[in-house]
Image (cartoon, rainbow, N blue to C red):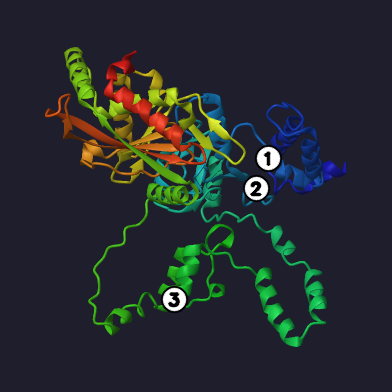
Amino acid sequence: MAYASRIINHSKKLKHVSTLLRREHTVAVRGFSNSTTHPSLPAREDMLKTRLSFSPVERISKCRASTVPMHNGISTMSTKPMTGPSLFREYISSQMRSVRGFSSGSDLPPHQEIGMPSLSPTMTEGNIARWLKKEGDKVAPGEVLCEVETDKATVEMECMEDGYLAKIVKEEGAKEIQVGEVIAITVEEEEDIQKFKDYTPSSGTSPPAPEAKPAPSPPKEEKVEKPANAPEAKTSKPSFAPSEDRIFASPLAKKLAEDNSVPLSSIKGTGPEGRIVKADVEEYLASRGKETTAKPSKPTDSKAPALDYVDIPHTQIRKVTASRLAFSKQTIPHYYLTVDTCVDKMMSLRTQLNSYQEASGGKRISVNDLVIKAAALALRKVPQCNSSWTDEYIRQFSNVNINVAVQTENGLYVPVVKDADKKGLSTIGEEVRFLAQKAKENSLKPEDYEGGTFTVSNLGGPFGIKQFCAVINPPQAAILAIGSAEKRVVAGSGPDQFNVASYMSVTLSCDHRVIDGAIGAEWLKAFKGYIETPESMLL
Protein backbone atom coordinates (compact mmCIF):
# COMPACT_ATOMS: atom_id res chain seq x y z
CA MET A 1 0.00 0.00 0.00
CA ALA A 2 2.80 2.40 0.81
CA TYR A 3 4.31 1.81 -2.62
CA ALA A 4 0.98 2.52 -4.36
CA SER A 5 0.23 5.60 -2.24
CA ARG A 6 3.59 7.17 -3.14
CA ILE A 7 2.92 6.63 -6.81
CA ILE A 8 -0.48 8.31 -6.50
CA ASN A 9 0.95 11.24 -4.53
CA HIS A 10 3.52 11.87 -7.25
CA SER A 11 1.28 11.14 -10.23
CA LYS A 12 1.35 14.78 -11.30
CA LYS A 13 5.10 14.69 -11.57
CA LEU A 14 5.43 11.38 -13.31
CA LYS A 15 4.63 10.45 -16.89
CA HIS A 16 3.82 7.05 -18.30
CA VAL A 17 4.07 5.32 -14.90
CA SER A 18 2.99 1.93 -16.17
CA THR A 19 5.56 2.02 -18.94
CA LEU A 20 8.33 2.98 -16.54
CA LEU A 21 7.38 0.21 -14.10
CA ARG A 22 7.52 -2.37 -16.85
CA ARG A 23 10.90 -1.04 -17.96
CA GLU A 24 12.23 -1.17 -14.39
CA HIS A 25 11.26 -4.82 -14.22
CA THR A 26 12.91 -5.37 -17.60
CA VAL A 27 16.11 -3.66 -16.43
CA ALA A 28 16.25 -5.82 -13.30
CA VAL A 29 15.79 -8.98 -15.35
CA ARG A 30 18.28 -7.81 -18.00
CA GLY A 31 20.90 -7.25 -15.29
CA PHE A 32 20.98 -11.00 -14.62
CA SER A 33 20.75 -12.32 -18.17
CA ASN A 34 22.99 -12.73 -21.18
CA SER A 35 26.27 -13.22 -19.35
CA THR A 36 28.30 -12.76 -22.51
CA THR A 37 27.35 -9.13 -22.95
CA HIS A 38 26.73 -7.91 -19.40
CA PRO A 39 28.85 -7.52 -16.24
CA SER A 40 29.61 -10.35 -13.84
CA LEU A 41 27.08 -11.52 -11.26
CA PRO A 42 28.57 -9.53 -8.33
CA ALA A 43 28.52 -6.39 -10.46
CA ARG A 44 24.87 -6.99 -11.31
CA GLU A 45 24.00 -7.53 -7.63
CA ASP A 46 25.71 -4.24 -6.71
CA MET A 47 23.82 -2.53 -9.50
CA LEU A 48 20.48 -3.91 -8.27
CA LYS A 49 21.24 -3.02 -4.65
CA THR A 50 22.08 0.53 -5.70
CA ARG A 51 18.83 0.79 -7.62
CA LEU A 52 16.74 -0.64 -4.73
CA SER A 53 18.30 1.85 -2.32
CA PHE A 54 16.16 4.59 -3.88
CA SER A 55 12.59 5.19 -2.80
CA PRO A 56 9.91 3.66 -5.07
CA VAL A 57 9.22 6.97 -6.77
CA GLU A 58 12.91 7.68 -7.24
CA ARG A 59 13.33 4.24 -8.77
CA ILE A 60 10.59 4.99 -11.25
CA SER A 61 12.18 8.31 -12.24
CA LYS A 62 15.58 6.71 -12.56
CA CYS A 63 14.62 3.33 -13.97
CA ARG A 64 15.87 4.26 -17.43
CA ALA A 65 19.20 5.72 -16.32
CA SER A 66 22.51 4.81 -17.88
CA THR A 67 23.72 2.80 -14.87
CA VAL A 68 22.51 -0.33 -16.66
CA PRO A 69 24.94 -1.23 -19.42
CA MET A 70 23.30 -1.77 -22.78
CA HIS A 71 24.69 -3.92 -25.57
CA ASN A 72 24.01 -1.33 -28.26
CA GLY A 73 25.05 2.30 -28.03
CA ILE A 74 23.09 5.38 -28.98
CA SER A 75 25.17 6.31 -31.98
CA THR A 76 27.54 4.63 -34.36
CA MET A 77 29.68 5.54 -37.31
CA SER A 78 28.68 4.78 -40.90
CA THR A 79 31.69 2.80 -41.98
CA LYS A 80 32.21 -0.47 -43.74
CA PRO A 81 33.80 -3.17 -41.60
CA MET A 82 37.50 -3.77 -41.85
CA THR A 83 39.26 -7.04 -41.10
CA GLY A 84 37.30 -8.55 -38.25
CA PRO A 85 34.06 -6.66 -39.00
CA SER A 86 32.21 -7.62 -35.84
CA LEU A 87 35.14 -6.61 -33.64
CA PHE A 88 35.52 -3.23 -35.34
CA ARG A 89 31.77 -2.56 -35.22
CA GLU A 90 31.69 -3.45 -31.51
CA TYR A 91 34.64 -1.12 -30.79
CA ILE A 92 33.03 1.83 -32.56
CA SER A 93 29.68 1.18 -30.90
CA SER A 94 31.26 0.98 -27.46
CA GLN A 95 33.13 4.24 -28.01
CA MET A 96 30.06 6.15 -29.14
CA ARG A 97 27.55 5.35 -26.43
CA SER A 98 25.71 8.41 -25.20
CA VAL A 99 24.91 9.40 -21.64
CA ARG A 100 21.30 9.40 -20.52
CA GLY A 101 20.17 12.28 -18.34
CA PHE A 102 16.90 12.34 -16.40
CA SER A 103 14.87 14.57 -14.15
CA SER A 104 12.34 13.61 -11.51
CA GLY A 105 10.47 16.86 -12.09
CA SER A 106 7.69 17.28 -14.61
CA ASP A 107 9.47 20.18 -16.33
CA LEU A 108 12.31 17.98 -17.67
CA PRO A 109 11.24 14.66 -19.19
CA PRO A 110 13.57 11.70 -19.80
CA HIS A 111 16.17 12.48 -22.44
CA GLN A 112 19.45 11.31 -23.91
CA GLU A 113 22.70 13.24 -23.81
CA ILE A 114 24.75 12.30 -26.88
CA GLY A 115 28.46 12.73 -26.21
CA MET A 116 31.40 13.31 -28.53
CA PRO A 117 32.50 9.78 -29.50
CA SER A 118 36.04 8.42 -29.64
CA LEU A 119 36.41 7.32 -33.25
CA SER A 120 40.07 6.29 -33.24
CA PRO A 121 42.60 5.08 -30.67
CA THR A 122 44.43 8.43 -30.73
CA MET A 123 41.39 10.71 -30.66
CA THR A 124 41.01 12.93 -27.57
CA GLU A 125 38.91 15.73 -29.07
CA GLY A 126 36.94 16.45 -32.22
CA ASN A 127 35.17 19.16 -34.21
CA ILE A 128 31.61 19.37 -35.49
CA ALA A 129 32.02 19.75 -39.25
CA ARG A 130 28.33 19.82 -40.16
CA TRP A 131 24.91 19.01 -38.69
CA LEU A 132 22.65 17.11 -41.06
CA LYS A 133 19.67 17.27 -38.67
CA LYS A 134 18.01 20.36 -37.20
CA GLU A 135 16.48 20.84 -33.78
CA GLY A 136 13.01 19.33 -33.83
CA ASP A 137 13.77 16.82 -36.59
CA LYS A 138 12.77 13.22 -36.12
CA VAL A 139 15.67 10.77 -36.08
CA ALA A 140 15.68 7.07 -36.78
CA PRO A 141 18.29 4.30 -36.62
CA GLY A 142 20.74 4.57 -39.51
CA GLU A 143 20.15 8.28 -40.18
CA VAL A 144 23.20 10.55 -40.05
CA LEU A 145 23.11 13.11 -37.25
CA CYS A 146 26.26 15.05 -38.02
CA GLU A 147 29.76 14.90 -39.48
CA VAL A 148 32.58 14.78 -36.93
CA GLU A 149 36.09 15.88 -37.82
CA THR A 150 38.40 13.52 -35.96
CA ASP A 151 42.17 13.60 -35.64
CA LYS A 152 42.47 11.74 -38.96
CA ALA A 153 39.34 12.20 -41.08
CA THR A 154 35.76 13.45 -41.23
CA VAL A 155 33.33 10.74 -40.16
CA GLU A 156 29.53 10.51 -40.29
CA MET A 157 27.82 9.77 -36.97
CA GLU A 158 24.56 7.83 -37.14
CA CYS A 159 21.69 7.51 -34.68
CA MET A 160 20.69 4.09 -33.40
CA GLU A 161 17.37 4.94 -31.69
CA ASP A 162 14.09 6.53 -32.69
CA GLY A 163 13.34 9.94 -31.26
CA TYR A 164 13.56 13.69 -31.86
CA LEU A 165 16.57 16.00 -31.83
CA ALA A 166 15.58 18.38 -29.03
CA LYS A 167 18.75 20.42 -28.57
CA ILE A 168 22.04 20.93 -30.42
CA VAL A 169 24.51 21.76 -27.66
CA LYS A 170 27.59 22.14 -29.88
CA GLU A 171 26.83 24.16 -33.00
CA GLU A 172 28.25 23.54 -36.45
CA GLY A 173 31.91 24.52 -36.55
CA ALA A 174 32.51 23.93 -32.81
CA LYS A 175 36.13 22.92 -32.25
CA GLU A 176 38.21 21.13 -29.64
CA ILE A 177 35.27 19.23 -28.13
CA GLN A 178 36.61 16.72 -25.64
CA VAL A 179 35.64 13.07 -26.03
CA GLY A 180 32.53 12.42 -23.93
CA GLU A 181 31.42 16.06 -23.89
CA VAL A 182 27.70 16.45 -24.66
CA ILE A 183 26.97 17.62 -28.21
CA ALA A 184 23.20 17.03 -28.52
CA ILE A 185 20.02 16.05 -26.68
CA THR A 186 17.35 13.69 -28.00
CA VAL A 187 13.91 12.89 -26.58
CA GLU A 188 11.33 10.22 -27.31
CA GLU A 189 8.21 12.42 -27.48
CA GLU A 190 7.82 15.35 -29.88
CA GLU A 191 5.99 17.49 -27.30
CA ASP A 192 9.07 17.35 -25.03
CA ILE A 193 11.27 19.28 -27.50
CA GLN A 194 10.31 22.76 -26.26
CA LYS A 195 11.26 21.87 -22.69
CA PHE A 196 14.93 21.71 -23.74
CA LYS A 197 15.06 25.11 -25.43
CA ASP A 198 17.26 26.61 -22.70
CA TYR A 199 18.72 23.34 -21.48
CA THR A 200 22.33 23.23 -20.32
CA PRO A 201 23.91 19.80 -19.81
CA SER A 202 25.03 19.02 -16.30
CA SER A 203 28.75 18.65 -15.65
CA GLY A 204 28.21 15.43 -13.71
CA THR A 205 30.82 16.35 -11.09
CA SER A 206 28.57 17.42 -8.19
CA PRO A 207 29.08 14.26 -6.06
CA PRO A 208 32.91 14.42 -5.96
CA ALA A 209 32.89 18.11 -4.95
CA PRO A 210 32.19 17.70 -1.23
CA GLU A 211 34.62 14.76 -1.06
CA ALA A 212 37.45 16.98 -2.29
CA LYS A 213 37.46 18.87 1.04
CA PRO A 214 37.91 16.31 3.83
CA ALA A 215 37.79 17.83 7.29
CA PRO A 216 40.39 15.63 9.02
CA SER A 217 43.24 16.37 6.58
CA PRO A 218 44.00 20.03 7.56
CA PRO A 219 44.40 19.24 11.28
CA LYS A 220 46.88 16.47 10.43
CA GLU A 221 49.01 18.90 8.48
CA GLU A 222 48.85 21.45 11.31
CA LYS A 223 49.87 18.92 13.93
CA VAL A 224 52.94 17.97 11.97
CA GLU A 225 53.94 21.57 11.47
CA LYS A 226 53.39 22.79 15.04
CA PRO A 227 56.73 21.49 16.32
CA ALA A 228 58.47 23.13 13.41
CA ASN A 229 59.50 26.77 13.29
CA ALA A 230 56.90 29.43 12.62
CA PRO A 231 58.27 30.48 9.21
CA GLU A 232 58.04 26.89 8.02
CA ALA A 233 54.40 26.68 9.08
CA LYS A 234 53.60 29.86 7.20
CA THR A 235 55.11 28.62 3.99
CA SER A 236 53.43 25.22 4.22
CA LYS A 237 49.89 26.55 4.59
CA PRO A 238 49.72 28.44 1.31
CA SER A 239 51.10 25.36 -0.47
CA PHE A 240 48.17 23.30 0.85
CA ALA A 241 45.42 25.78 0.03
CA PRO A 242 45.60 25.49 -3.76
CA SER A 243 45.21 21.71 -3.54
CA GLU A 244 41.79 22.21 -1.91
CA ASP A 245 40.47 24.71 -4.47
CA ARG A 246 42.37 23.59 -7.49
CA ILE A 247 41.62 25.48 -10.68
CA PHE A 248 41.51 23.33 -13.80
CA ALA A 249 42.65 24.98 -17.03
CA SER A 250 44.10 23.86 -20.33
CA PRO A 251 47.85 24.45 -20.90
CA LEU A 252 47.10 27.01 -23.60
CA ALA A 253 44.73 28.90 -21.31
CA LYS A 254 47.34 28.93 -18.53
CA LYS A 255 50.00 30.27 -20.88
CA LEU A 256 47.70 32.99 -22.25
CA ALA A 257 46.65 34.03 -18.74
CA GLU A 258 50.27 34.12 -17.56
CA ASP A 259 51.38 36.24 -20.53
CA ASN A 260 48.67 38.80 -19.78
CA SER A 261 49.09 38.70 -15.97
CA VAL A 262 45.53 37.46 -15.43
CA PRO A 263 44.78 35.33 -12.32
CA LEU A 264 42.92 32.16 -13.23
CA SER A 265 40.74 32.54 -10.13
CA SER A 266 39.04 35.56 -11.70
CA ILE A 267 38.02 33.65 -14.85
CA LYS A 268 34.94 31.46 -15.05
CA GLY A 269 35.52 28.27 -17.03
CA THR A 270 33.06 27.05 -19.63
CA GLY A 271 34.85 23.85 -20.62
CA PRO A 272 34.14 20.31 -19.42
CA GLU A 273 33.58 20.21 -15.64
CA GLY A 274 34.18 23.95 -15.41
CA ARG A 275 37.61 23.77 -17.00
CA ILE A 276 39.09 27.08 -18.18
CA VAL A 277 39.88 27.03 -21.90
CA LYS A 278 41.54 29.49 -24.25
CA ALA A 279 38.23 31.10 -25.26
CA ASP A 280 37.46 31.95 -21.61
CA VAL A 281 40.74 33.84 -21.21
CA GLU A 282 40.26 35.68 -24.50
CA GLU A 283 36.73 36.70 -23.49
CA TYR A 284 38.03 37.95 -20.15
CA LEU A 285 40.73 40.01 -21.85
CA ALA A 286 38.22 41.45 -24.30
CA SER A 287 35.92 42.52 -21.46
CA ARG A 288 38.80 44.39 -19.81
CA GLY A 289 39.96 45.92 -23.07
CA LYS A 290 43.43 44.38 -22.85
CA GLU A 291 43.64 42.60 -26.20
CA THR A 292 47.29 42.80 -27.20
CA THR A 293 47.54 46.49 -26.33
CA ALA A 294 50.77 46.17 -24.37
CA LYS A 295 52.61 43.90 -26.80
CA PRO A 296 52.95 46.35 -29.75
CA SER A 297 55.07 48.54 -27.47
CA LYS A 298 57.93 46.03 -27.66
CA PRO A 299 58.57 46.43 -31.41
CA THR A 300 58.31 50.22 -31.07
CA ASP A 301 61.01 50.26 -28.41
CA SER A 302 63.43 48.52 -30.76
CA LYS A 303 64.37 49.84 -34.15
CA ALA A 304 63.52 46.56 -35.93
CA PRO A 305 60.40 46.85 -38.12
CA ALA A 306 57.31 44.88 -37.15
CA LEU A 307 56.82 41.60 -39.00
CA ASP A 308 53.78 41.00 -41.14
CA TYR A 309 52.27 37.54 -40.57
CA VAL A 310 49.10 35.46 -40.68
CA ASP A 311 48.11 32.94 -37.97
CA ILE A 312 46.76 29.74 -39.54
CA PRO A 313 44.66 27.64 -37.12
CA HIS A 314 45.71 24.02 -36.67
CA THR A 315 43.56 21.38 -38.33
CA GLN A 316 42.89 18.11 -36.52
CA ILE A 317 45.14 16.17 -38.90
CA ARG A 318 47.94 18.71 -38.39
CA LYS A 319 47.66 18.32 -34.62
CA VAL A 320 47.82 14.54 -34.67
CA THR A 321 50.66 14.55 -37.20
CA ALA A 322 52.67 16.90 -34.98
CA SER A 323 52.05 14.90 -31.80
CA ARG A 324 52.67 11.47 -33.33
CA LEU A 325 55.86 12.42 -35.17
CA ALA A 326 57.22 14.25 -32.13
CA PHE A 327 56.45 11.15 -30.07
CA SER A 328 58.20 9.00 -32.70
CA LYS A 329 61.44 10.99 -32.70
CA GLN A 330 61.48 11.27 -28.90
CA THR A 331 60.82 7.62 -28.08
CA ILE A 332 61.94 5.52 -31.07
CA PRO A 333 65.70 5.01 -31.63
CA HIS A 334 65.91 5.63 -35.38
CA TYR A 335 68.72 4.47 -37.63
CA TYR A 336 68.89 4.71 -41.42
CA LEU A 337 70.07 2.42 -44.22
CA THR A 338 70.41 3.69 -47.81
CA VAL A 339 70.94 1.71 -51.00
CA ASP A 340 70.94 2.55 -54.73
CA THR A 341 68.88 0.29 -56.98
CA CYS A 342 69.08 0.03 -60.75
CA VAL A 343 65.58 0.53 -62.16
CA ASP A 344 66.19 -0.02 -65.90
CA LYS A 345 64.59 -3.49 -65.96
CA MET A 346 61.70 -2.28 -63.78
CA MET A 347 61.02 0.61 -66.17
CA SER A 348 61.13 -1.75 -69.13
CA LEU A 349 58.66 -4.14 -67.46
CA ARG A 350 56.39 -1.22 -66.56
CA THR A 351 56.31 -0.11 -70.21
CA GLN A 352 55.28 -3.60 -71.31
CA LEU A 353 52.61 -3.93 -68.65
CA ASN A 354 51.16 -0.50 -69.46
CA SER A 355 50.82 -1.44 -73.11
CA TYR A 356 48.73 -4.43 -72.02
CA GLN A 357 46.72 -2.23 -69.68
CA GLU A 358 45.95 0.31 -72.39
CA ALA A 359 44.91 -2.42 -74.79
CA SER A 360 42.48 -3.84 -72.23
CA GLY A 361 41.19 -0.44 -71.11
CA GLY A 362 42.86 -0.56 -67.71
CA LYS A 363 44.70 2.12 -65.75
CA ARG A 364 48.44 2.63 -66.11
CA ILE A 365 50.78 1.14 -63.53
CA SER A 366 53.03 3.63 -61.73
CA VAL A 367 56.53 3.23 -60.32
CA ASN A 368 55.01 3.62 -56.88
CA ASP A 369 52.78 0.58 -57.47
CA LEU A 370 55.85 -1.52 -58.27
CA VAL A 371 57.64 -0.18 -55.18
CA ILE A 372 54.69 -1.08 -52.93
CA LYS A 373 54.58 -4.60 -54.36
CA ALA A 374 58.34 -5.07 -53.94
CA ALA A 375 58.20 -3.78 -50.35
CA ALA A 376 55.34 -6.14 -49.51
CA LEU A 377 57.15 -9.17 -50.92
CA ALA A 378 60.33 -8.20 -49.08
CA LEU A 379 58.35 -8.02 -45.82
CA ARG A 380 57.04 -11.50 -46.47
CA LYS A 381 60.62 -12.72 -47.02
CA VAL A 382 61.98 -10.86 -43.95
CA PRO A 383 59.02 -10.82 -41.50
CA GLN A 384 61.09 -9.34 -38.65
CA CYS A 385 60.62 -5.94 -40.30
CA ASN A 386 56.84 -6.43 -40.30
CA SER A 387 56.63 -5.96 -36.54
CA SER A 388 55.98 -3.43 -33.79
CA TRP A 389 57.37 -2.84 -30.31
CA THR A 390 55.49 -3.21 -27.01
CA ASP A 391 56.81 -3.15 -23.45
CA GLU A 392 56.20 -6.88 -23.01
CA TYR A 393 56.93 -8.33 -26.45
CA ILE A 394 57.60 -7.70 -30.15
CA ARG A 395 54.45 -8.29 -32.19
CA GLN A 396 55.15 -9.80 -35.61
CA PHE A 397 52.26 -9.47 -38.05
CA SER A 398 51.08 -12.11 -40.50
CA ASN A 399 49.29 -9.56 -42.68
CA VAL A 400 51.37 -7.25 -44.88
CA ASN A 401 49.46 -3.94 -44.90
CA ILE A 402 51.31 -1.06 -46.54
CA ASN A 403 50.48 2.55 -45.61
CA VAL A 404 51.11 5.02 -48.45
CA ALA A 405 51.86 8.64 -47.56
CA VAL A 406 49.56 11.08 -49.39
CA GLN A 407 50.01 14.85 -49.16
CA THR A 408 46.83 16.99 -49.31
CA GLU A 409 45.88 20.59 -48.65
CA ASN A 410 44.67 19.59 -45.18
CA GLY A 411 47.81 17.69 -44.24
CA LEU A 412 49.51 14.32 -44.51
CA TYR A 413 47.39 11.16 -44.70
CA VAL A 414 48.58 7.53 -44.77
CA PRO A 415 45.81 5.30 -46.19
CA VAL A 416 46.53 1.58 -46.14
CA VAL A 417 46.66 -1.08 -48.88
CA LYS A 418 45.82 -4.29 -47.03
CA ASP A 419 47.43 -7.62 -47.93
CA ALA A 420 49.54 -5.94 -50.58
CA ASP A 421 51.72 -9.03 -50.93
CA LYS A 422 48.72 -11.00 -52.23
CA LYS A 423 47.43 -8.42 -54.72
CA GLY A 424 48.38 -7.76 -58.31
CA LEU A 425 49.93 -4.54 -59.57
CA SER A 426 46.74 -3.30 -61.21
CA THR A 427 44.73 -3.89 -58.01
CA ILE A 428 47.32 -2.05 -55.93
CA GLY A 429 47.28 0.86 -58.39
CA GLU A 430 43.48 1.12 -58.31
CA GLU A 431 43.37 1.07 -54.51
CA VAL A 432 46.09 3.70 -54.16
CA ARG A 433 44.34 6.05 -56.59
CA PHE A 434 40.99 5.54 -54.86
CA LEU A 435 42.41 6.11 -51.37
CA ALA A 436 44.43 9.14 -52.48
CA GLN A 437 41.28 10.73 -53.90
CA LYS A 438 39.39 10.08 -50.66
CA ALA A 439 42.27 11.62 -48.71
CA LYS A 440 42.15 14.78 -50.83
CA GLU A 441 38.38 14.97 -50.26
CA ASN A 442 38.90 14.46 -46.51
CA SER A 443 36.50 11.51 -46.59
CA LEU A 444 38.70 8.63 -45.38
CA LYS A 445 37.05 6.17 -43.01
CA PRO A 446 38.96 4.61 -40.08
CA GLU A 447 39.28 1.30 -41.94
CA ASP A 448 40.99 3.21 -44.77
CA TYR A 449 44.02 4.17 -42.65
CA GLU A 450 44.11 1.84 -39.62
CA GLY A 451 45.84 -1.53 -39.45
CA GLY A 452 49.04 -0.71 -41.37
CA THR A 453 52.26 -2.61 -40.60
CA PHE A 454 54.75 -0.73 -42.82
CA THR A 455 54.81 2.67 -44.58
CA VAL A 456 56.12 3.84 -47.95
CA SER A 457 56.79 7.55 -48.57
CA ASN A 458 57.68 8.65 -52.11
CA LEU A 459 59.06 12.15 -52.69
CA GLY A 460 61.10 11.17 -55.73
CA GLY A 461 58.56 10.80 -58.50
CA PRO A 462 56.22 13.69 -57.60
CA PHE A 463 58.86 16.17 -56.34
CA GLY A 464 62.23 15.02 -57.67
CA ILE A 465 63.84 14.60 -54.23
CA LYS A 466 67.02 12.56 -54.65
CA GLN A 467 67.17 11.05 -51.15
CA PHE A 468 65.65 11.67 -47.71
CA CYS A 469 65.09 10.01 -44.33
CA ALA A 470 61.49 9.54 -43.22
CA VAL A 471 60.18 9.50 -39.64
CA ILE A 472 58.77 6.17 -38.46
CA ASN A 473 54.99 6.04 -38.17
CA PRO A 474 54.32 4.50 -34.72
CA PRO A 475 53.54 1.81 -33.73
CA GLN A 476 55.27 0.50 -36.86
CA ALA A 477 58.97 -0.36 -36.80
CA ALA A 478 60.09 0.85 -40.24
CA ILE A 479 59.32 3.25 -43.09
CA LEU A 480 60.78 3.32 -46.62
CA ALA A 481 61.71 6.65 -48.22
CA ILE A 482 61.80 6.61 -52.05
CA GLY A 483 63.95 9.10 -53.94
CA SER A 484 63.96 9.99 -57.63
CA ALA A 485 65.56 7.93 -60.38
CA GLU A 486 68.48 9.52 -62.20
CA LYS A 487 70.85 8.43 -64.95
CA ARG A 488 74.42 7.70 -63.91
CA VAL A 489 77.57 6.64 -65.71
CA VAL A 490 78.73 3.27 -64.45
CA ALA A 491 81.70 1.08 -65.26
CA GLY A 492 81.21 -1.49 -68.03
CA SER A 493 82.64 -4.96 -68.44
CA GLY A 494 85.86 -3.78 -70.09
CA PRO A 495 88.56 -1.53 -68.63
CA ASP A 496 87.62 1.43 -70.83
CA GLN A 497 83.92 0.75 -71.14
CA PHE A 498 81.23 2.85 -69.50
CA ASN A 499 77.48 2.45 -69.47
CA VAL A 500 74.58 4.71 -68.57
CA ALA A 501 71.96 3.33 -66.18
CA SER A 502 69.10 4.72 -64.07
CA TYR A 503 69.46 4.42 -60.31
CA MET A 504 66.99 5.17 -57.53
CA SER A 505 68.04 5.85 -53.93
CA VAL A 506 65.92 4.34 -51.17
CA THR A 507 66.37 4.81 -47.42
CA LEU A 508 64.96 2.50 -44.76
CA SER A 509 64.30 4.08 -41.33
CA CYS A 510 64.31 1.38 -38.64
CA ASP A 511 63.35 1.12 -34.97
CA HIS A 512 66.48 -0.33 -33.39
CA ARG A 513 64.44 -1.88 -30.58
CA VAL A 514 62.77 -4.18 -33.12
CA ILE A 515 65.06 -4.35 -36.16
CA ASP A 516 68.78 -4.92 -35.79
CA GLY A 517 71.11 -3.47 -38.40
CA ALA A 518 71.74 -6.82 -40.09
CA ILE A 519 67.99 -7.51 -40.34
CA GLY A 520 67.39 -4.10 -41.89
CA ALA A 521 70.19 -4.72 -44.37
CA GLU A 522 68.71 -8.13 -45.22
CA TRP A 523 65.35 -6.53 -45.96
CA LEU A 524 66.94 -3.91 -48.22
CA LYS A 525 68.79 -6.66 -50.05
CA ALA A 526 65.50 -8.48 -50.69
CA PHE A 527 63.81 -5.23 -51.80
CA LYS A 528 66.65 -4.39 -54.16
CA GLY A 529 66.46 -7.89 -55.65
CA TYR A 530 62.78 -7.44 -56.52
CA ILE A 531 63.40 -3.99 -58.04
CA GLU A 532 66.38 -5.06 -60.16
CA THR A 533 64.76 -8.37 -61.23
CA PRO A 534 61.10 -7.31 -61.38
CA GLU A 535 60.02 -10.52 -63.12
CA SER A 536 60.43 -12.29 -59.79
CA MET A 537 57.53 -10.23 -58.39
CA LEU A 538 55.20 -11.92 -60.87
CA LEU A 539 56.00 -15.44 -59.66
Task: Name which residue lies at 70% across and 42% down.
Answer: 67
Percent coordinates x, y for residue 362 in the rendering: 22, 17
Front residue (pair 178, 434): 434
Task: Name which residue lies at 48% across and 74% down.
Answer: 258
Give the foreground label among 1 and 3: 3
- Check the picture and name the quadrant holding the N terminus: top right
Task: Name which residue lies at 40% across and 33% down.
Answer: 521
The residue that label 1 is drawn on is 64
The residue that label 3 is drawn on is 260
Percent coordinates x, y for residue 302 in the rendering: 27, 82
Looking at the rendered structure, the secondary structure element under dot 2 is loop
Report the Cα–Cα distance between label 1 and label 3: 48 Å
Report the Cα–Cα distance between label 3 and label 2: 41 Å
Front residue (pair 330, 173): 330
Going from the N terminus, do you reach mark 2 or mark 1 first? Answer: 1
> What kind of residue is marked 1?
Arg
Q: In the picture provided, is 90 more to the left or to the right than 130?
A: right
Going from the N terminus, do you reach mark 1 or mark 3 first? Answer: 1
